């Protein structure tokens, strides 16, 4: 271990997150590999080690004998200060070697607020921030993850981005980099070749031009640039690589349990939801595969909890046989199963009873909108009846708490819709009074609201976000309407929502803002401990950019969107049609009732969309 | 099955695993190796394991003792090897046996400290350290649960010696493990308070062996 690191560790909180050495970490002989990849997660160890994509890609990249992929996370503030003071550069956990020694530096970026941490980690590694300032082939700096579907704000800092799922394309890219390194290629030659790989977006091959009003006039393709970059997917999840020997952290992380992935994509098509669209087409694993993977994972890790991952667990067709298979293994071993992302409309008490034998703490449902009209407008196909029915069986079954999530500021929302949230809370309370099994324990109803953030590649990508003063007014309206005791109200901070909205639909001019925020000390901006709203506003003002232009402006149908060179499979006209149906308050049936021909199935070469 | 005792070492990168995290890590290691720890009954069942004399984060050990019980009557042959294969780097299971004596009988601890001195001569430091610890009383201020208080650590140090080596001094000590408990780190802290010129730039410690009051190795 580096002497500087050894002296720092006793002084920082939770040092085990900075040492590596966990069970199942992958150690290779660095002299025996051709490429070393520093796989960076722009957030803390606790968050990054809970990320399933990170775990999958760590193993797929390491499945190549010629590659050693190691993990790198962002240090918390105390460790950051100590590292700066000691002159210790960012290092990878497995070997402890500095990130600047690696051939490739790959980032997994799941949310926009992590952008500044990407810059920070490059800087801590001593790597020039801007791609243009890195003339050599290595270290090649690239990124993937859902915050790359519109990665324009961070485009100037990355040599390339991966659009879609990385299992196959990452290794194709590394194979090319290995050839390029051995052949002494220039960086430019490599990038031009890489751009031919499906799902690889090389930002330097695209030059956006702007109109006087700041909107994009056109995106000029430079020689060698594909017209569009189409998202990559893994077609058959049953045969796709899935890590059955994941690294088991020696210190507590956020998701400290085994995870199995039921399916990708979503059949629902909620109009505000990016995830429900960018992960299409719907592809499920067979229950036999999942039971086998779950058992192997639990045996190999020693975890005492297992969670089932997907965007909407109850939409998994074979949920019953899957639960039977898993419970048969888990029950006699006292292994807990958890089933997040349940919907209020097809909630099965039977399943909940079986998985939560001991503790019945709380249930959470995303209701999103306060009235049926609004829920129809956003295509959230949950009725008040569904919710109350679900609450009734939950209260009868012994639960004594329920959490309801809503968004404020959705398109077409009125004050009546907001008061509707309070009414619904009262209905739920009433339902508890009538049906609760254990009344003496009391009830906790939690209403939680966030501010609607329009996302690219969702039907609401053209919609304005409400101004923050208006958001605060709506929060106050709801707070004043929630009169019942036993109902707690939590709301998300306005300032972060505005910055996230700016970045989500940002263009490349925001690169300067990211750099200025980082230079002014911005990092780990997803944490309230570190986020500074004035820092963002000053950086935007200095760059001559108006947050309202990005966040609060309605885009026209024919506006060139900054991300229009990216194709996630779902066609733009589908998004527009869904947006129009919002204003007509018309529901669209879920994919299983009727295929909407969104276009995502076109990504499949042989298989069928499970929607 | 009776109460069993595992002796294990915790060195290298594993010294940074905290006591609570270690408990969880050991439980998982047992499960991975195919042994089922006995759980308590009740509303919140937990594995019945306990580790004698919890270690401070950053201190290594060659003599950690963990008491546990197993479900059923599993074959204990090969347990240390099987367990070690399923442990993270730096943890190693050394032996398993039926626990006969209570950990409360542990009295003395042999420990080793590595004192690093940047740009100071190890020989001179070793000499100064020997003189310092030859005093009859060393009263330092300690933070306890009840606030700060002065106490003499010298009676808790039964033997101590200092050997110059490359980059610093190796301290070999036999100190009181319980009643009173002397954390080896206080051996360096005392210098910071009472003899700053001898205070190392960095010090790290490793437990070597535990003994009962008659200086018999405790197992």
Image (cartoon, rainbow, N blue to C red):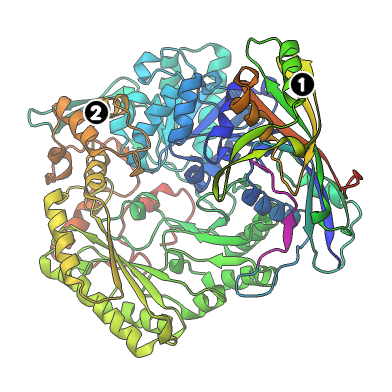
Q: Is residue A139 left or right of residue B48?
A: left
Q: Residue furthest front?
A: B136
Q: Which percent across, then down, holds residue B77?
A: 92, 54
Q: Is B50 covered by the magenta stretch?
A: yes
Q: In this rendered view, identify the residue nearer to me: B95 or A202.
A: B95
Q: Quadrant of residue A217?
A: top left
**Where A396 falls versus A596 (above or below)?**
below
Within 10 angstroms of label 1, few (less than 14), some, or many (20 or more) residues? some
Q: In this rendered view, identify the residue nearer to me: A55 or A379.
A: A55
Q: In this rendered view, identify the residue nearer to me: A443 or A579.
A: A443
Within 10 angstroms of label 2, few (less than 14), some, or many (20 or more) residues? many
**Where B190 falls versus A592 (above or below)?**
above
Q: Which mark is residue A294?
A: none
Query: Disc 1 to disc 2, how far (Cα)?
Result: 59 Å
Chain where mark 1 sits: B
Q: Main secondary structure of the magenta part?
A: loop
- Tag 1 and tag 2, C-beta contact below 8 Å: no
- Circle 2 SS class: helix
Q: Which percent across, then down, holds residue B27?
A: 70, 56
Chain where mark 2 sits: A
Q: Which percent across, then down, holds residue A434?
A: 34, 90
Q: Which residue is mark 2?
A: A513
Q: In this rendered view, identify the residue nearer to me: B172 or A115.
A: B172
Residue depth check, mark 1 versus mark 2: number of the one nearer the observer? 1
Is residue A293 visible from the viewing direction of this image?
A: yes
Q: Which residue is mark 1?
A: B130
Q: Quadrant of the N terminus of chain B?
A: bottom right
The part of the chain drawn in magenta is B46-57
């Amino acid at each position: 271990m580096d002497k500087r690191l050894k002296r720092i560790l006793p002084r920082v909180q939770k040092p085990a997150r900075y040492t590596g050495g966990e069970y199942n970490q992958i150690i290779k002989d660095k002299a025996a590999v051709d490429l070393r990849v520093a796989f960076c997660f722009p957030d803390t160890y606790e968050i990054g080690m809970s990320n399933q994509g990170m775990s999958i890609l760590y193993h797929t990249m390491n499945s190549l004998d010629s590659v050693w992929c190691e993990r790198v996370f962002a240090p918390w503030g105390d460790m950051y200060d100590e590292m700066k003071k000691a002159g210790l550069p960012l290092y990878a956990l497995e070997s402890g070697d500095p990130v600047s020694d690696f051939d490739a530096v790959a980032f997994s970026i799941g949310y926009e607020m992590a952008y500044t941490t990407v810059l920070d980690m490059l800087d801590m590694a001593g790597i020039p921030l801007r791609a243009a300032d890195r003339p050599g082939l290595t270290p090649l700096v690239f990124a993937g993850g859902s915050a790359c579907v519109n990665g324009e704000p961070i485009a100037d800092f990355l040599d390339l981005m991966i659009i879609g799922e990385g299992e196959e394309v990452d290794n194709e890219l590394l194979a090319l980099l290995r050839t390029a390194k051995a052949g002494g290629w220039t960086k430019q030659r490599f990038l031009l070749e890489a751009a031919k790989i499906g799902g690889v977006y090389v930002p330097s091959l695209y030059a956006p031009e702007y109109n006087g009003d700041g909107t994009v006039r056109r995106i000029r393709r430079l020689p060698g640039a594909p017209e569009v970059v189409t998202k990559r997917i893994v077609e058959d999840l049953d045969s796709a690589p899935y890590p059955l020997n994941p690294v088991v952290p020696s210190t507590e992380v956020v998701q400290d349990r085994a995870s199995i992935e039921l399916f990708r994509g979503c059949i629902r098509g909620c109009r505000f939801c990016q995830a429900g669209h960018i992960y299409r087409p719907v592809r499920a694993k067979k229950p036999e595969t999942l039971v086998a993977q779950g058992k192997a994972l639990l045996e190999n890790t020693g975890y005492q909890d297992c969670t089932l991952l997907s965007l909407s667990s109850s939409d998994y067709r074979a949920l019953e046989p899957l639960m039977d298979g898993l419970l048969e293994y888990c029950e006699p071993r006292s292994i807990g199963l958890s089933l997040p992302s349940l919907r209020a409309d097809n909630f099965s008490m039977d399943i909940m009873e079986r998985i939560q034998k001991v503790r019945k703490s709380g249930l959470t449902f995303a209701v999103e909108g306060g009235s049926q009209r609004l829920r129809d407008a956003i295509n959230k196909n949950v009725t008040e009846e569904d919710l109350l029915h679900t609450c009734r069986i939950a209260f009868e079954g012994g639960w004594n708490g329920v959490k309801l999530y809503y968004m404020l500021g959705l398109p077409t929302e009125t004050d009546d819709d907001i008061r509707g949230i309070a009414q619904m809370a009262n209905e739920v309370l009433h339902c508890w009074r009538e049906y609760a099994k254990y009344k003496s324990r009391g009830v906790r109803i939690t209403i939680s609201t966030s501010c609607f953030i329009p996302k690219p590649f969702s039907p609401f990508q053209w919609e304005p976000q409400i101004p923050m003063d208006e958001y605060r007014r709506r929060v106050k309206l709801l707070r004043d309407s929630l009169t019942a005791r036993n109902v707690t109200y939590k709301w998300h901070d306005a300032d972060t929502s505005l910055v996230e909205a700016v970045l989500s639909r940002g263009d490349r001019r925001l690169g300067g803002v990211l750099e200025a925020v980082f230079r002014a000390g911005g990092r780990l901006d997803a944490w309230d401990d570190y986020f500074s709203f004035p820092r963002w506003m000053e950086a935007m003002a200095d760059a001559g950019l108006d947050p309202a232009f990005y966040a609060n402006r309605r885009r026209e149908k024919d506006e060139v969107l900054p991300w229009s060179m990216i194709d996630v499979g779902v066609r733009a006209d589908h998004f527009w049609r869904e947006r129009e149906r919002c204003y007509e308050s018309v529901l669209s049936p879920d994919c299983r009732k009727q295929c909407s021909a969104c276009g995502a199935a076109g990504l499949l070469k042989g298989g069928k969309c499970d929607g | 099955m009776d109460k069993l005792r595992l002796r294990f070492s915790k060195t290298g990168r594993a010294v940074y695993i905290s006591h609570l995290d270690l408990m969880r890590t050991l439980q998982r290691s047992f499960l991975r190796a195919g042994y089922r720890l006995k759980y308590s009954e009740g509303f919140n069942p937990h594995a019945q394991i306990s580790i004698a004399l919890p270690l401070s984060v950053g201190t290594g050990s060659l003599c950690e003792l963990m008491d546990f019980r197993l479900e059923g009557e599993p074959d204990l042959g090969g347990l240390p090897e099987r367990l070690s294969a399923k442990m993270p780097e730096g943890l190693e299971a050394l032996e398993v046996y039926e626990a006969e004596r209570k950990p409360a009988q542990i009295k003395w601890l042999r420990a080793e400290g590595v004192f690093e001195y940047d740009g100071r001569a190890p020989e001179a430091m070793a000499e100064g350290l020997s003189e310092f610890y030859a005093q009859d009383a060393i009263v330092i201020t300690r933070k306890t649960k009840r606030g700060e208080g002065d106490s003499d650590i010298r009676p808790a140090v039964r033997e101590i010696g200092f050997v110059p080596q490359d980059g610093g001094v190796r301290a070999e000590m036999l100190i009181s493990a319980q009643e009173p408990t002397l954390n080896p780190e206080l051996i360096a802290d005392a210098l910071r308070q009472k003899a700053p010129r001898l205070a190392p730039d960095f010090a790290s410690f490793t437990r070597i062996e535990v003994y009962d009051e008659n200086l018999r190795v405790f197992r």
